[in-house]
Structure formats: structure tokens, C-alpha cells
Image (cartoon, rainbow, N blue to C red):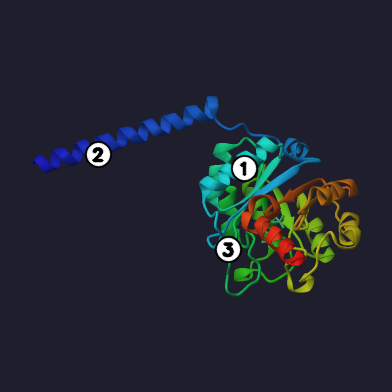
Amino acid sequence: MLDEIIIIRLDLVASKIYLNWQIGSQLKNLFGGKKMVKKEDISKQLKGGLVVSCQALENEPLHSSFIMARMARAAKEAGAVGIRANSVVDVQAIMDTVELPVIGIIKSVYEESDVFITPTLKEVRQIAATGVPIIAMDGTQRRRPKDEKLEEIVKIIREEYPETLLMADTATLKDISYANSLGFDFIGTTLYGYTEETKGENIAKNDFEQMKEVLKTATVPVIAEGKIDTPEKAKEALALGCHCIVSGGAITRPQEIAKRFVNALQEEA
Ligand SMILES: CC(=O)N[C@H](C=O)[C@@H](O)[C@H](O)[C@H](O)COP(=O)(O)O
């Protein structure tokens, strides 16, 4: 009898907490919640600025949502216009910390495919559900896990999240033409140098030779991303006509930053 009373009371307490939480979030949405920002405004916000990629995978020293949110805060203090981040937890921690547009991705490795940046509909939906204004996904023509097709993913996510901007992370000019045809909002050079076909390449090589071709091929704004590791390169990419810059490792991966110093000292010795 006593057990039953205790269980009923616990149930009542739990229901009350749940109800309060629900009312609280509804009120927050009504009065204090995040405002829906229009697609054109997000694009304007990014134009001509620096987006800082705040990412640390499980095998990296700074792997922690708390630290990534602090990185995002530092980026904001420096004047960054946006953040790029990996995983639902990091994106949520960052969106709770800074009021900057976030480019969300989920890196996920599948055995049967080399595609790992938001590779399947599952990851696209998971990251979309966080409310990120922009989702970036692999925009190469490589075979995707589970044989999913990029055009299908884009079609479905456009229906489910019409207000979310989509960025294609590409490697080759062919990828860019493909992304144009699928109606992406942004094209990123993220994977140039990271696929079988482009291994060892660098977007800044020969005075940004490849970037100039990218800009001629793309029919939507181009985001310069991948090894834009100095302020000079960032400035040059913007001058060529890129919409904005994403820089990561050179700002938020201390192991890469320290390595550049160590390498320079070793070259001197
Ligand atoms: C190839 C790949 O996995 N790129 C990832 C994409 O999100 C990140 O690891 C990069 O840090 C990001 O693209 C920014 O580039 P960089 O760190 O070179 O400034």
C-alpha cells in the first residue's frame, strides 16, 4: 500500500515537472526563443566575413562540446561572422553560447564509402533538427553509403526544412556543376585535396588557380574552405569573389598551430 502511494506521488511529481518544462519551453518560444532568420539575411550576414570552424574529433586533444563553444565565443569576440561545427552536441552547445549563424555537419564514417561529411539522410536529418540555419554535406559524385543519392537527400530535406540553407562540400569542377544542378545555396571548396582525384592539391596553389575556375563554374555563392590558413589567403580568396571564408585548423586546432612552429624551428636547425 505504502509502495503504491510512493509510486503514485512520484508519478505526479514527474508529470508536474514535465508539464512545467513544456509550458516553459512554449513560453520561451513565444517570448524569448530564437527568432527565425530569413535565408537571404543569413547569406548577407556571412558575406565578406570569416567563419571559424570549431571542430575536434574524438581523437583530438580538444574533443569537447564545452571547449568548442568557448572557441566559438573567442571567434565571435574576434569578429567572426559564423561558425562551422560538427555533431549535434557541439552545434547545440555553440548555438546556446553565441548568436552567430552555424554551418552544421555530422562527420560519420561508413565502411562501404569514402563519403564522411553528413553522408546520409540520417545525419542530414539529425543536424537539421538542431535548427542550424545552414547544413553542409558532401557534394562529390562519389558513391554514398547505403547507395543513397544526393539528389534524393536534397529533395527530401528541402521538403522537410524549406528554411534551411544547403552547402555542398565539393572537390572537383564536376562536383560543382552537379551541385549547381541540385540547387544548393552555397558551394564550398572543402574537399579539394581530400579525395582520390584531388589528393595532395591545395586551393591556394599557383595563385589560387583552381579557385578561379571554381568561381567561373559555380552559379551560386562560393565559400572558400580548406587550408585557408593565413589572413593573406583569406583576403585573396575574398578579393577573387568568394562569398566568405571558412578557416579551421589554423585557428582552432592548437596541435596544428604548434606543429607549424615546431616544423619551422626544425627547418632552421
Ligand atoms: C576535409 C575535412 O574533413 N574538412 C573538415 C570539414 O568540415 C574540417 O576538418 C576542416 O577543419 C574544415 O573544412 C576547415 O578547413 P581547415 O581546417 O583546413 O581550415
Q: Nearer the viewer, residue 259 or 233?
A: 259
Hey, which residue is sitting farthest top in the picture? 31
Could you tell me which quadrant the C terminus lies in? bottom right
Q: Position of residue 175 (x, y in %)?
A: 79, 64
Name the N-terminal-most of marks 1 and 2: 2
Q: Which corner quadrant of the figure contains ligand 1?
A: bottom right
Name the N-terminal-most of marks 3 and 2: 2
Q: Nearer the viewer, residue 58 or 125?
A: 58
Mark 2 crowd level (few <14, some 14–19, many ≥20, 10 Å Cα): few
Q: Position of residue 78 (x, y in %)?
A: 69, 38
Residue pictured at 68% horizontal, 50% vertical: 251
**Which residue position is annotated with label 3?**
108
**Which residue position is annotated with label 1?**
72
Residue pictured at 90% horizontal, 57% vertical: 212
Residue 11 has which mark? Answer: 2
Regarding residue 2, the answer to whether it shows in the image is yes
Please, is residue 245 above or below residue 260 in the view?
Answer: above
Please, is residue 13 above or below residue 199 in the view?
Answer: above
Query: Hey, what amino acid is under mark 1?
Result: Ala
**SS at badge 2:** helix
